Image (cartoon, grey):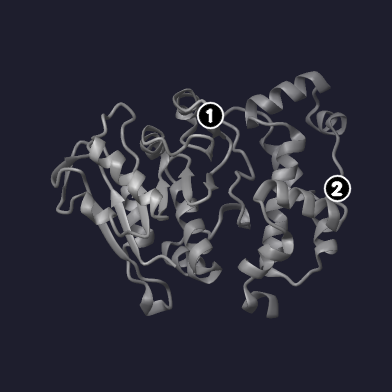
Amino acid sequence: MIEKVAAVVVPGVAPFEMGIAYEVFGIDRSDTGGPSFDFTLCTPEPGLVPTKGGFPIGIERGLDATEDADVVIVVAYGVETTLPPALLDALRRAHERGAWLFAECSGAFALAEAGLLDGRRCTTHWMYTDRLAAAVPTAKVDPDVLFVQDGRILTSAGTAAGIDAALHLVRTELGAEAARNIARRMVVPPQRDGGQAQFVVDPLPREGESLSGLLAWMREHLDEQHTVPALARRAMLSERTFARRFRDETGTTPLALLTRQRVARAQELLESTDASIDEIGRLVGFGSAAVLRHHFARTLGTSPVAYRRRFACADEIAS
């Protein structure tokens, strides 16, 4: 159970990401049945802190606010910023006593500098994933995800992905309904693409790229079996050109993308329906419960039954 949340800002803090931390954890939503947290903004040197946007913000609390926080958020900042040793020590102490550490976007570099990402899965903004991988060679930096949870360390990709990660944290600690309540008030989906996965389900091609229609079609036909030759024909490309362009535009392979989409769709069905595991396996294109369990465990580290037990919304299943 999380009650106290401390968000750390440093010079060059990103205002939007700071707003995400406040919006999710700083608003009392008990009037609509939602959660309420003891939320504090803090900084290594209280006073006026310059932001990335060129305007200062006044922060009154120092790092003492992190000492008994259940969640310590490192808000995104300019990656060239020199961090004070006191902040790195505070992060280490929070980790040692079992608090959640949540790094928004470039905040992952603070965890890296504190030595907390060694040997862990993590992510950051796609512009900085190579840099993070170079900074922590033992880390498994994934550039293709919205966020990654490794133990009680949570890292998110750029900007709005912090919302997905924050709602995941609420969902994990307080349950699906608490996350839904916050999302409803924020007028955002509880999890993009309808599931609870930490993976980007539909990579968005950059402007002018050619496979957006195919990606949408694949998502609408998850229950069908797809091969590279068949997909290449639908895209009207040679297999070699299709494979190269698919990776260029999505950063992954057709099989890996389909697996992510199918797992995410399975999560949505587990959360909102009472369909059997075997039926869900067929509906999402895995063919059987056994194959679904395999990919569920490999992707999320849990089983479909355990996931449903934790995240299913009883009201939706009953309806």
Q: Is residue 7 left or right of residue 286?
A: left
Position above or below: 159 against 249 = below
- Name the residue that disc number 1 marks: 138
For the residue labelled by badge 2, is the local secondary structure a helix, a strand or a loop?
loop
The residue that appears at 67% across and 63% down in the rendered structure is 307
Give the mark nearer the N terminus: 1 vs 2: 1
The residue positioned 45% from the left and 62% from the top of the image is 187
From mark 1 to mark 2, how far is it between C-alphas?
A: 38 Å
- Which amino acid lies under the numbered mark 2 shown in the image of this protein? Glu
Indicate the quadrant where residue 250 lies: top right
Q: Is residue 31 left or right of residue 258?
A: left
Q: Residue at x 53, y 71 (%)?
A: 177
Q: Position of residue 255 (x, y in %)?
A: 77, 36
Q: Is residue 14 visible?
A: no
- Measured as percent of width and height from the top left, residue 178 is found at 48, 70
As drawn, the label of residue 224 is 2
Sort mark 1 into few (<14), some (14-19) or many (20+) by Cα contacts within 10 Å: few
Q: Amino acid at mark 1?
A: Thr
Tell how many labels: 2
Q: Is residue 65 visible?
A: yes
Mark 2, other Cα within 10 Å: few <14 / some 14–19 / many ≥20: few
Q: Quadrant of residue 226?
A: top right
Image vertical order of residue 24 relative to residue 9, above or below:
below
